[in-house]
Image (cartoon, grey):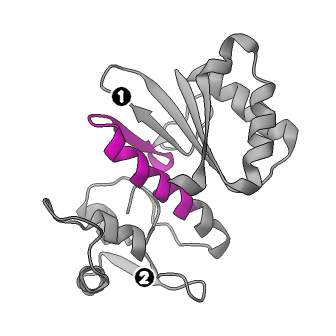
Amino acid sequence: MGEQYACRADHLARVLVKPGERGPASARRVRGATARWERLGLVEQASFLTGEPPWTWLTRAGLRQVGLPFRVWQPKAWMLAHVAAINQVRLFVEPRRPGARWVPERELRLNPGSRPVPDAEIHDPGGTVTAVEVELSRKSTDRRRRVMQDLVAHYDSVWYFASVAAWDAVHDASCAVPVQLTDLVRIYPLEEC
């Protein structure tokens, strides 16, 4: 939760599964855990959109408790769809990459250096580093092309998880990648995560 800025209750249900259990944790377990954390002053929670599960995020005390060096993040409704999509991708990718480490954007922003900062990096045990980008909407063609070209210049591979609305624009940007680097870019449908 702290690494990903915030977590929606349905995503927490997937995180709170006990070893040996199948499927997500019950809504009751999620509510109990978040209520307990809130009483301890470790989290805050709120609902932002009607019909959407509530969100939970760490307070300053919560960040200290789990040893994360980040600033407290206050959710903004306009950012939550992107945060939810990144959480969805992380929950999809991590079980399929045993031994790999997901490095979230928040951690990457602590020491950005001169390279682009993607939504996440995946560090595989063999040393391969993959940039992960999650795209929900169309952006300017020039900007998307620049970002993609920067990413392929700095990473072993680049994975885009694109919504239906963003698919054509992401594909278009991939066509502008130099031919010798096109094999580094993979585009996956976000809706299948």
> Is residue 12 left or right of 7 when viewed as pictured?
left
Q: Tell whether 92 sits left or right of 62.
A: right
Q: Is residue 162 left or right of residue 168?
A: left
State the separation of the CA atoms marked 1 and 2: 33 Å
Of residues 116 and 134, the one drawn nearer to the viewer in this rendering: 134
- Under mark 1, the amino acid is Asp
Which residue is depicted at the point 81% across and 35% down? 172
Say few, some or many: other residues with alpha carbon within 10 Å of mark 1 (under 14 / 14 to 19 / 20 or more).
some
Q: Give the residue drawn at x 28%, y 37%.
A: 98
Q: Is residue 14 left or right of residue 183?
A: left
Q: Residue at x 40, y 67 (%)?
A: 11
Q: Earlier in the sequence, mark 1 or mark 2?
A: 2
The magenta span reads 83-107
Q: Please say if the residues under marks 1 and 2 sit with CB atoms less than 8 Å apart.
A: no
Quadrant the N terminus occupies: bottom left
Residue 77: give x, y in percent of width and height: 63, 75
**Residue position for label 1:** 124
Using the image as rendered, state which of residue 177 and residue 73 is in the foreground.
177
Asked if 172 appears above or below 134 in the picture, the reply is above
* Position of residue 14 measured from the top left corner of the image (x, y, whole percent): 33, 65
Q: Is residue 183 above or below residue 53?
A: above
Residue 129: image location, x then y, percent: 45, 26
- Residue ranking furthest to the left: 20
Mark 2 is surrounded, within 10 Å at the Cα level, by few (under 14), some (14 to 19) or many (20 or more) other residues, namely many
Closer to the observer: label 1 or label 2?
1
Name which residue type carries label 2: Gln
Residue 57 visible in this rendered orientation of the protein: no
Give the main secondary structure of the magenta stretch.
helix
Q: Quadrant of residue 142?
A: top right
Q: Which residue does the numbered mark 2 point to in the structure image?
A: 45
Q: Any magenta on residue 1? A: no
